[in-house]
């Protein structure tokens, strides 16, 4: 294992400290318990938005803290949900009197810890609502699984809900639009290589030189199928077809197409993949109204990508275009 | 003879030891069908409990120790294991109450409450390839032994053996809850890490009871 780290147990603390120093104009880092809040938090009268989860997905979530997006992010240990204490501290820190929305990716640990923190916040008189993202079509949503995972769609939920809160929407309105985005977004990912959790020191799974995993999540967990490496266009088809068929997306839809890198795949390959994804959408008469390409929700140094498609309406487009000033997304301001 | 505060503290120390000793094994099991953090998280949690044992006020009961473990695990472990084990110890503490000594029936009731807490929080059933598959056989064995009038060390011994067998029995199962469920059929052939850590903790409880009985 070769990594730019000191003590594996201090990776998250030291990285978050650096993040705070680098972006002191946007965020404030609180330690013990660790959480990252907007520099001007709490914003009086505005709905606060808190997200969080295991670390290793950077820039998710701290990279999205700032004007027009999240008010706080709670980083857990690598690939491990944070505990209720820092989630509660972050919730209190961003409560501007209009209530707080928790955006939670659907993993058993994240849901349980955020639920506990929400109960504790309610006991302190803070109104909390939670929206659980579950956009990964690779997982069967049935009684026989923990339900679909929250993956790429989470970034889009955070941007759009963040803009709604920034323009002054009520907690119920912000939760409603977050639910609406989640209901209209679907994703699927693949990995060319596994990743190595620093304290584990070994890859989370092994792949032969010519093998890839289809349907991976973002925690280094293996996917559902292992197949031979194929040309990019075929790989894109393997992801986008289940995504489009699931909602289903129909001709005439306007969408946001999001091609995301898993951390170890260069932009040259992501844009190459975007080219094919755009082609497929065009063939189906689906209009790409907005796009996002880059490493926005990652799995450490994993090579791979995910494709996310969101069916847009006018309000979502307006909120997507609204100004945002965070470490990882910044426009219009 | 019942189990008192000395046993409870010894159980926690033995738990911390056994989790530290099996940290890499739990990480490896979790890497196969989960995300590889279980051993690390459990080790962090139990290591955090140890220094707090020294601060327990005089007159503390086994229930107080269980409550201390619960609150510490909830605030340090994270993942699903933190809330699940935290709830288990908290529910167990509730049943232990302020008793200074726990006999076989009382211990069986503590284990039952702990298992019920895990089921309530995690919504898993037997056969879902989770911690519940170690806990439910353990509870059944403990209740059977207690109603036969076995001494408390034998009750915990029966529970620990059943939990170990329950952990073994998770190997062929297809996971239906937790992160391993994402793998579908591919989760078969691997031991559930939560069932294994549960078996280790219950074995530590039984060993502490045997040591107390021999003392």
Image: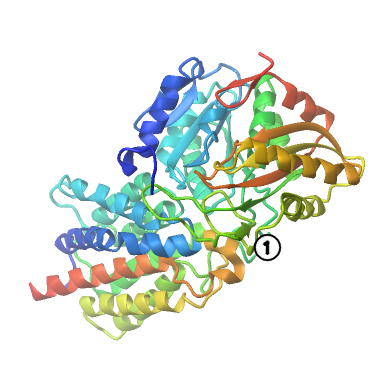
Q: Residue A47 at x, y = what percent?
A: 61, 25
Q: Residue at x 18, y 47 (%)?
A: B56
x and y percent of residue B96 in the render? 29, 61
Q: Is residue A251 left or right of residue B199?
A: right
Quarter of the picture holding the C terminus of chain A: top right
Percent across and percent down for residue A106 are 59, 49
Task: Locate residue B4: give its quadrant.
Answer: bottom left
Residue B167 in percent (x, y) is at: 40, 74
Q: Chain of mark 1?
A: A
- Which secondary structure lies at badge 1? loop
Q: Which residue is mark 1?
A: A142
Side of A47 relative to B87 (left or right): right
- Count residues near mark 1 (Cα–Cα under 10 Å), then give few for <14, some for 14-19, many for 20+: few
Q: A10 or B57, which is in the foreground?
A: A10
Residue B214 horizontal side relative to residue A85, left or right: left
Picture residue at 54% right of the left edge, 62% below the top: A208
- Can residue B173 be seen here? The reply is yes
User: Which residue occupies 68% across, 34% down?
Assistant: A293
């Amino acid at each position: 294992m070769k990594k730019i780290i000191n003590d594996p147990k201090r990776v998250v603390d030291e990285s978050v400290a650096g993040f705070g120093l680098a972006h002191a104009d946007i965020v404030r880092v609180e330690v013990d318990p660790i959480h990252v809040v907007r520099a001007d938090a709490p914003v009086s009268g505005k709905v606060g938005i808190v997200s969080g989860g295991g670390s290793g997905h950077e820039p998710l979530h701290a990279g999205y803290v700032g004007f027009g997006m999240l008010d706080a992010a709670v980083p857990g240990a690598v690939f491990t949900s944070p505990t209720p204490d820092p989630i509660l501290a972050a919730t209190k820190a961003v409560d501007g009197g209009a209530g707080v929305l928790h955006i939670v990716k659907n993993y058993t640990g994240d849901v349980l810890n955020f639920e506990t923190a929400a109960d504790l916040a309610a006991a302190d008189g803070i109104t909390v609502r939670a929206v659980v993202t579950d956009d990964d079509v690779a997982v069967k949503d049935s009684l026989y699984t923990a339900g679909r995972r929250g993956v790429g769609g989470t970034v889009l939920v955070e941007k759009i809900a963040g803009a709604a809160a920034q323009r002054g929407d009520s907690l119920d309105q912000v939760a409603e639009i977050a639910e609406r985005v989640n209901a209209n977004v679907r994703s699927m990912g693949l990995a060319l290589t596994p990743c190595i959790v620093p304290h584990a020191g070994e890859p989370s799974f092994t792949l032969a030189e010519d093998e890839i995993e289809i349907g991976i999540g973002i925690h280094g967990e293996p996917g559902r199928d292992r197949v031979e490496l194929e040309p990019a266009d075929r790989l894109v088809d393997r992801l986008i077809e289940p995504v489009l068929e699931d909602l289903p997306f129909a001709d005439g839809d306007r969408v946001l197409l999001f091609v995301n890198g898993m951390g170890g795949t260069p932009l040259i390959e992501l844009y190459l993949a975007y080219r094919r994804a755009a082609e497929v959408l065009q063939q189906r008469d689906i209009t790409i109204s907005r796009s996002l390409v880059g490493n926005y929700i990652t799995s450490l140094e994993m090579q791979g990508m995910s494709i996310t498609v969101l069916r847009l309406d006018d309000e979502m487009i307006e909120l997507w275009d609204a100004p945002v000033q965070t470490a990882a997304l910044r426009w219009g301001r | 003879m019942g189990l008192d505060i000395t046993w409870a503290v010894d159980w926690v120390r033995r738990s911390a030891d056994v989790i530290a000793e099996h940290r890499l094994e739990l990480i490896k099991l979790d890497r196969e069908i989960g995300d590889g953090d279980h051993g690390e998280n459990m080790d962090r949690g139990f290591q955090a409990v140890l220094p707090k044992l020294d601060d327990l006020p005089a007159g503390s009961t086994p229930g107080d120790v269980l409550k201390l473990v619960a609150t510490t695990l909830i605030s340090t472990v994270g993942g699903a294991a933190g809330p699940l084990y935290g709830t288990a110890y908290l529910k167990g503490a509730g049943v232990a109450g302020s008793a200074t000594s726990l006999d076989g029936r009382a211990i069986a009731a503590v284990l039952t409450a702990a298992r019920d807490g895990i089921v309530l929080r995690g919504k898993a059933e037997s056969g879902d390839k989770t911690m519940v598959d170690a806990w439910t056989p353990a509870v059944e064995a403990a209740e059977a032994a207690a109603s036969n009038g076995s001494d408390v060390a034998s009750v915990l011994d029966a529970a620990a053996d059943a939990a170990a067998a329950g952990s073994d029995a998770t190997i062929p199962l297809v996971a239906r809850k937790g992160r391993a469920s994402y793998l579908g059929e591919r989760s078969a052939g691997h031991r559930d890490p939560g069932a294994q850590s549960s078996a280790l903790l219950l074995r530590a409880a039984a060993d502490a009871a045997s040591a107390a009985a021999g003392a």
